[in-house]
């Protein structure tokens, strides 16, 4: 890639903002503007902060109304390179070809693993102990362009996705600090991905957080960690009401019973049987917008949690006392 003098940023969310700020810090004169989206209805939005950045620095900020508007802005601004972080619309092949040095983005996985949507969620759900970011060039395929740089972090047993995101964001900025200028100067080259190692993941939606208690305890625990703040939350149904699970732990010993059954209630946790005769200890949950300890909402051993709001009313469930 030849030396670049006109760079356009496209993106949103926290990592996008941090990336834009770092690009400005590393080389102000080459940054010709930024395109973002108004995602104010998303709890993760940084839209006001993008506007503040533009006002403070004088870097022009454009809010794209839709995909076509964004592509029109790219054409009008005439960048030599687009740097993309936190962008949710596909970029047409014709637009990719219009920019001389193409589009470079940050993907939350160690490509070629976890190409596609929600890569970090899937990484935690599937139990990855090492995750990372990839700085790569866009192509007409799905996240299969050549890689400029990567950074790795470890995922600890008790890490939730908010913690992993923070570590990944810091790693991404560290990588950017070391590689951004060499990319612009053309002093480094990207490396093609190994197709034999490629895996893919689908975009996740709020309903994908519905817990199936017939699954193994660790799989359920990973789902809870992966869907926690700032995501919509893994959820179950208790006596017909949706209950979001924000914090939980794994119980270390076998626990026999029926999937979804309440096995033990303490002040700090409620133990729920899973499909492999292990238990997940629910700590913080939310019902009807109210968050609190699980024991605040689950007070009876007659309750069986379910992934169906119509299948966990268990008035027919009998608990008998036995004496010896």
Image (tube, grey):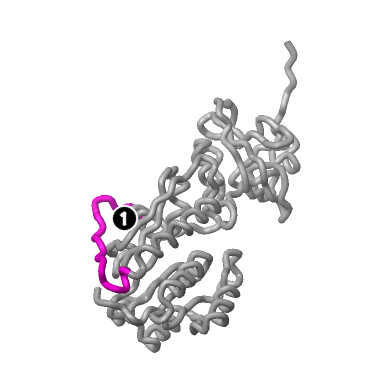
Q: Which quadrant of the figure has residue 201?
A: bottom left
The residue indicated by pointer 1 is 112
113 in relation to 141, above or below: above
- Secondary structure beneath dot 1 equals loop
Residue at (71% x, 56% y) in the render: 289
Q: Residues within 10 Å of mark 1 (few under 14, many from 20)?
A: many
Residue at (40% x, 53% y) in the render: 132
Q: Is residue 40 left or right of residue 168?
A: right
Of 193 and 167, nearer the camera is 167
Residue at (52% x, 34% y) in the render: 275
Of 143 and 66, nearer the camera is 143
Q: Position of residue 187 (x, y in %)?
A: 25, 69
Residue ranking furthest to the bottom: 76
Q: How many marks?
A: 1
Magenta stretch encompasses residue 186: yes
Q: Is residue 281 left or right of residue 91?
A: right
267 in relation to 164, above or below: above
Residue at (41% x, 75% y) in the render: 27
Magenta stretch encompasses residue 237: no
Q: Quadrant of the N terminus?
A: bottom left
Q: Is residue 85 left or right of residue 234?
A: left
Of 76 and 278, nearer the camera is 76
Q: Position of residue 304 (x, y in %)?
A: 65, 37
Q: Position of residue 25 (x, y in %)?
A: 46, 72
Q: Quadrant of the C terminus?
A: top right
Q: Which residues are magenta?
A: 182-201
Q: Position of residue 44 (x, y in %)?
A: 57, 64
């Amino acid at each position: 890639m030849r030396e670049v003098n006109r760079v356009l940023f496209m993106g949103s969310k926290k990592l996008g903002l941090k990336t834009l700020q770092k690009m400005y810090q590393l080389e102000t004169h080459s940054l010709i503007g930024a395109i973002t989206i108004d995602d104010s209805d998303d709890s993760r939005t940084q839209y006001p902060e993008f506007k503040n950045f533009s006002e403070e620095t004088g870097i022009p900020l454009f809010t794209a109304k839709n995909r076509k508007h964004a592509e029109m802005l790219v054409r009008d601004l005439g960048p030599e390179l687009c740097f993309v972080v936190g962008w949710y619309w596909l970029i047409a092949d014709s637009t990719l070809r219009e920019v001389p040095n193409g589009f470079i983005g940050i993907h939350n996985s160690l490509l070629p693993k976890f190409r596609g949507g929600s890569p970090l969620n899937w990484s935690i759900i599937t139990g990855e102990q090492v995750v990372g970011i990839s700085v790569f060039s866009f192509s007409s395929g799905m996240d299969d362009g050549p890689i400029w740089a990567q950074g790795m972090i470890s995922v600890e047993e008790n890490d939730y996705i908010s913690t992993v995101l923070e570590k990944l964001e810091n790693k991404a900025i560290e990588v950017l600090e070391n590689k951004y200028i060499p990319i612009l100067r053309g002093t480094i080259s990207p490396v093609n991905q190994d197709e034999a190692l490629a895996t893919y993941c689908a975009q996740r939606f709020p309903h994908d957080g519905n817990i199936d208690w017939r699954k193994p305890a660790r799989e359920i625990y990973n789902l809870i960690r992966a869907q926690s703040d700032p995501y919509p939350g893994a959820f179950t149904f208790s006596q017909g009401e949706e209950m979001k699970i924000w914090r939980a732990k794994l119980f270390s010993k076998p626990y026999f019973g029926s999937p979804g059954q309440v096995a033990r209630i303490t002040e700090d946790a409620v133990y729920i049987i899973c499909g492999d005769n292990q238990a997940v200890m629910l700590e913080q949950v939310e019902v009807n917008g109210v968050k609190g300890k699980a024991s605040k909402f689950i007070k009876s051993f007659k309750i069986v949690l379910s992934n169906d709001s119509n299948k966990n009313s268990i008035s027919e469930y009998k608990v008998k006392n036995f004496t010896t």
